[in-house]
Amino acid sequence: MYLDEILQTAKEHSLEYSIPYISPSAGAILSMLVATTRSRAVVEIGTGTGSSGLWVLRSLPDGGMLTTIDYDSHCQNVARKLFEKAGIKSNMVRFINERALNILPRLAKHAYDIVIIDGQIDEVSYYYMYAKQMVRPYGLIVILHSLYKGNVADPAMRDRNTVTMREFLKSVSNDDEVSYCLIGNDDGMTVCTKMP
């Protein structure tokens, strides 16, 4: 099965389970970030059905490792099968079936090139705090779906998830530990570089 077909299958599963998926344009940016930083160690918070993981793995070199964390074992099994169909070597992916906040404090500090945040919105500030500890100097923290269905940019939208993400992005903009950029493609992507 070709990668584009596998990505389409991942999208269909995401729609079926009502969970976010990464668009082709956002996926291409994510894949480019992995390639240009020559990343070998990537953590993904929120496996979903594997769409973002597939984009990461497209650029991860042999010997690289994607650690992907999700508490939903069913979705992780879907992702695992799609990775196998894509010909991904099993030693390039470590699946952790657990709540991210139970795992992140136990992961090595300054050991990862990129941490991708795509988990529960109400926990995003905690993920970010741990991600800053986990990435190496000049490593990246990538927050997917930063504009939350476009709602963050609309002041009239005041639902809990929108307000949470809006306040989180404001805190990132005031964080002297990172240099950041909000990319306004599709559902938004925030890219932070951890300063030494």
Image: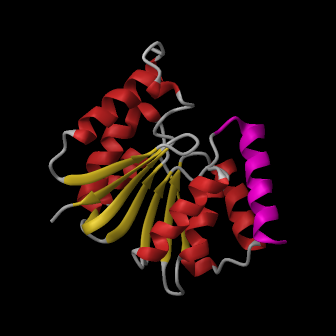
| Residue 95 in view (yes/no) | no
Q: Is 2 contained in the magenta span?
A: yes
- Give the main secondary structure, helix, strand or loop, of the magenta stretch: helix
Q: Residue, x 45% and y 27% (percent of image)?
A: 152
Q: Nearer the viewer, residue 62 or 71?
A: 62
Q: Residue, x 64% and y 65% (percent of image)?
A: 54
Q: Is residue 18 above or below residue 65?
A: above
Query: Which quadrant of the rendered structure holds the C terminus?
Result: bottom left
Q: Nearer the viewer, residue 156 or 135?
A: 156
Q: Is residue 170 above or below residue 39?
A: above
Q: Nearer the viewer, residue 81 or 160?
A: 160
Q: Position of residue 143 (x, y in %)?
A: 43, 48
Query: Which quadrant of the rendered structure holds the N terminus?
Result: bottom right
Q: Position of residue 70 (x, y in %)?
A: 54, 50
Q: Quadrant of residue 149?
A: top right
Q: Is residue 193 left or right of residue 76?
A: left
Q: Is residue 2 above or below residue 176?
A: below
Q: Is 130 contained in the magenta span?
A: no
Q: Is residue 132 left or right of residue 146?
A: left
Q: Is residue 69 above or below residue 41?
A: above
Q: Position of residue 137 (x, y in %)?
A: 22, 68
| Residue 166 in view (yes/no) | yes
What count of labels does the image hold?
A: 0
Q: Position of residue 132 (x, y in %)?
A: 26, 55
Question: Which residue, as the protein is rendered here, is positioned at the far right?
Answer: 1
Q: Residue, x 73% and y 78% (percent of image)?
A: 87
Question: Which residue, as the protein is rendered here, is positioned at the far bottom?
Answer: 62
Q: Quadrant of residue 7?
A: bottom right
**Residue stretch in magenta:** 1-19
Q: Nearer the viewer, residue 139 or 16?
A: 139
